[in-house]
Image (cartoon, rainbow, N blue to C red):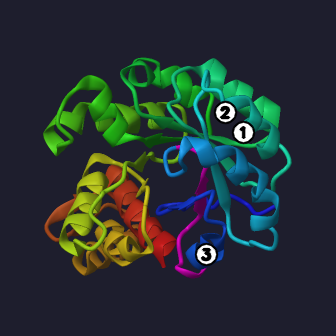
Amino acid sequence: MPTLPVQMNLPLFVPADRPERVAKAAAAGADAIIVDLEDAVAPSARESARAGLTDALQGVTCAIVLRINAVRTKWHEADLDIAANLPLSAIMLAKAESAAACANVASATLTPVIALVETARGIEQLNEIADASFRLAFGSIDYAADLGMGHTRQSLLSARSALVLAARLAGQPAPLDGVTTAIHNDALIEDDCRHAVELGMGGKLIIHPAQLTAARRGFAPSPDELSWARRVLDAAKGGAAVQIDDAMVDAPVIVRAKALVARAEGLA
């Protein structure tokens, strides 16, 4: 079974009813592929899409995540049945709203769960969901629709910050941010990713291979940041207090420097 990368920053969605796209997505260089049985597939096609997954995933060597339909939908139980017999690295539970739902998916499939939080109830139960899952992801578009608000940085700030905090308290990797719907607007994609980094997000859900290059730029430390981080880590090897760029290097500064280098290496 493929392993789930610790540095899974930019997983790419592929509709489950378009199995020919799985190999193309793997070749595009995404950190993982999210095969989607939920919103990307018409309700009338979900049963046939599910039936074709066993053949579609044969021979795929990169990490595969299966997004399954939410609890209390008519597709959820059948999704669990097929998921338990697929070579998956993780399962993404759509509209995760409780720790019990996440625990049930993990138990039924013996597979780590990425909880896609995209409703007000999910945010309200966030700490419990984080404790019962492997990682959090933000379904920002559905969340904005659930609350009847704009899909803007200002309106989503509190929810994004809540995900980052809950993930940290649960000892998880930093959350995956929601999608940018623009496919070919590289400037917007890169800027959205820089905003996600600023808030403490660890990655972003990608909906098209054309978004990957701009997204990598957005998550990558700048050359100046990386140079500073490496100088800090080199200076800290001596164990004595030192100054870098007229600032004292102490433990929190070293932690930030290590994180910048790790982020750069994870995107390499």
Residue 87, relative to residue 150: is it above or below?
A: below
Question: Which is more N-terminal, label 1 or label 3?
Answer: 3
Classify residue 119 as left or right of residue 149.
right
Q: CA distance from mark 2 to mark 3?
A: 27 Å
Q: Are marks 2 and 1 in contact (CB under 8 Å)?
A: yes
Residue 59, relative to residue 94: is it above or below?
A: below
Q: Residue furthest front?
A: 44
User: From the viewer's perspective, is the residue at label 3 or at label 1 nearer?
Assistant: 1
Q: Amino acid at mark 2?
A: Trp
Residue 99, relative to residue 93: is it above or below?
A: above
Instruction: Specify the label residue 79 is tagged with.
Output: 1
Q: Examine the image and state in which quarter residue 91 appears.
A: top right
Q: CA distance from mark 2 to mark 1?
A: 6 Å
- Residue that carries the numbered disc 2 in the rendered image: 75
Is disc 3 placed on a helix, strand or loop?
A: helix
**Label 2: how many Cα within 10 Å (few below 14, some 14–19, many 20+):** some
**Span shown in magenta:** 27-38
